[in-house]
Image: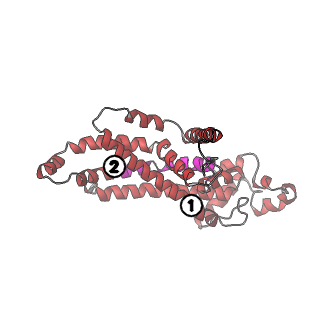
Amino acid sequence: MHLLLILAPGDAIDALPNADEVRPILEAEWQLDRSAPEQVLGYLWDVIRGDLRTSLVYRPGQPVLEVVWGPAWRSLWLLLTAVALSIGGGVALAAWTAGRPGISRPLVWAASLFPVFLVARVLVAAFNSGAWWLMERDLIARPGWFALPVEDHPFRWALAVSILAVASGALAEVHSESESLFQRIRGSGYVEAARARGAPTWPHILRNLLPPLTALVASRTAFFVGGLVILERMLNINGVGAILWRAALERDYPLALGITLLTAGAVALAKLLGDVARTTLDPRRRGT
């Protein structure tokens, strides 16, 4: 990514109003006068030393970690809520549809086929147009969230969470995986034995559902993060994804690369935690 940003037309100095006057000074200060390999190797050396450098244009002179610290918590809240919705919604739908014919299954899969940006664009246009049509006829007062995505309102966050949970494909995969698991677990010997004793069966079902679902959600982390960048940009949510978008447009190399590295580390950590959780929850995997 660093090399792509360097080789792309323009640089961070072009975003400044007095670019021509300060270019000779800033090229040397920001190391933009070096060759592409030298810039890449120099940045890698700084990262190895634990220095993610400072923002060039977005927050000039502010360390990258300080820039992303606050927005990272907003993005994390949005991400975790979407994950919880995809797991809860997928499992609830699977418990209802497992072993039964119905249209809910193809509907869930159809909703997951559309990309995040398209779903967000269509829903924003639909809500705005619908609200405006009703307001013109004095059927409703102006909603607090109108017009999306300008107004900051809880509805905007709920919309972002719903889009991320569905359009990322996680809801459909959790639903499909849970359906097959429900059918297999319900017909297993230990569940039938629990029924015969009059004992509750849900602890057995839950114990066997959690390990594969944990691994599934961990494997979808990269898709969640990719959708998060698009959603934050489209819905004006000031999170890490929106900052990454701005940093890439403004050629703020240290900020864009710092966010990319931190995000890659978070994705790798999520997958590691998923493997640890699956091993912990499923004793049968500890010997493999």
Image side of residue 192 versus residue 57, left or right: left
Magenta segment main secondary structure: helix
Instruction: Please name which of the two marks, 1 or 2, marks the residue nearer to the observer.
Output: 1
The residue closer to the viewer here, 241 or 164, is 164
Q: Nearer the viewer, residue 194 or 222?
A: 194
Which residue has dot 1 on it? 72
* Residue 237 appears left or right of 212: right
Label 1 element class: helix
Farthest residue toward the right?
21
Query: Is residue 231 positioned above or below 66 on the image?
Result: above
Does residue 18 appear left or right of residue 205 in this picture? right
Q: Residue at x 50, y 54 (%)?
A: 79
Q: Residue at x 31, y 32 (%)?
A: 101
Q: Earlier in the sequence, mark 1 or mark 2?
A: 1
The amino acid type of the residue labelled 2 equals Pro
Magenta range is 211-237
Q: Is residue 203 magenta?
A: no
Q: Position of residue 58 (x, y in %)?
A: 71, 59
